[in-house]
């Protein structure tokens, strides 16, 4: 049980998982030659995480984890939420998504937001979900060079800097994904 498949090829996600799971070998979809396009057709983060973990487990028959994350903004009634990765369209990149969020928020003072991650775990006998959540607010402009996704505009609660302005170590202590990964890690330690 030293090898875990992360249902992703995202280098940033792999890095976050590998930092916390330093005693395990975290491998990507590329490492198992999984090239299928997984359609995230769920209407919730939970559904999408389960869709991914089930498909990769059925392919590999090895312990697998997947995640789905979303930025939920109060003023936008929870958008972009489950559509965070494709908020500005299916072929949009992170900058396109960020620009759409900033445009939709305009000059509103209500910039409350939260990042949520759901991690799905699957082995031959168990399926389990783990949630990580961090509250914060959306900045008025793009700030910082690090991170990925919406990191340049998300300011965590009790901070004055965005995730992109933090070091990876700083971000990984408090981020939604790291909180969910730590819950998954505790589950592994208890097994």
Image (tube, rainbow, N blue to C red):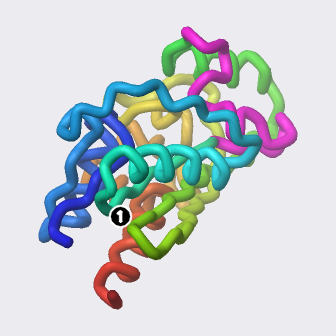
Q: Secondary structure beneath disc 1?
A: helix
Residue 67 location (% of width, % of height): 48, 50
User: Is residue 166 part of the magenta span, yes or no?
Assistant: no
Of the pair 68 and 80, the residue shown nearer to us: 68
The residue shown at (25%, 42%) is: 28
The residue shown at (32%, 79%) is: 188
Of the pair 141 and 68, the residue shown nearer to us: 68
Residue 21 location (% of width, % of height): 22, 66
Question: In the figure, is residue 168 to the left or right of 65?
Answer: left
The residue shown at (83%, 31%) is: 108
The answer, for residue 170, to whether it is visible in the render is no
Residue 90 location (% of width, % of height): 61, 14
Question: In the figure, is residue 21 to the left or right of 151?
Answer: left
Residue 131 location (% of width, % of height): 57, 65
Tell me which corner region of the image, top left, top right, bottom left or bottom right, holds residue 129: bottom right
Of the pair 33 and 90, the residue shown nearer to us: 33
Quadrant location of the C terminus? bottom left
Tell me which corner region of the image, top left, top right, bottom left or bottom right, holds residue 1: bottom left
Q: Tell me the residue that label 1 is attached to.
A: 173
| Residues in magenta, as a range | 71-91
């Amino acid at each position: 049980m030293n090898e875990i498949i992360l249902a992703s090829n995202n280098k940033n996600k792999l890095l976050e998982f590998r930092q916390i799971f330093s005693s395990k070998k975290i491998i990507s979809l590329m490492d198992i030659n999984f090239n299928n396009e997984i359609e995230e057709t769920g209407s919730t983060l939970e559904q999408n995480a389960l869709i991914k973990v089930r498909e990769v487990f059925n392919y590999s028959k090895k312990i697998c984890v997947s995640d789905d994350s979303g930025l939920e903004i109060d003023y936008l009634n929870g958008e972009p939420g489950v559509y965070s990765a494709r908020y500005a369209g299916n072929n949009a990149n992170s900058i396109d998504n960020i620009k759409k969020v900033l445009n939709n928020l305009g000059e509103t003072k209500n910039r409350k937001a939260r990042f949520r991650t759901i991690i799905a775990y699957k082995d031959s006998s168990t399926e389990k979900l783990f949630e990580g959540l961090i509250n914060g607010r959306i900045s008025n402009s793009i700030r910082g060079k690090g991170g990925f996704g919406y990191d340049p505009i998300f300011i965590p609660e009790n901070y004055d800097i965005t995730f992109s302005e933090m070091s990876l170590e700083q971000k990984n202590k408090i981020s939604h994904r790291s909180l969910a990964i730590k819950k998954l890690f505790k589950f592994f330690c208890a097994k």
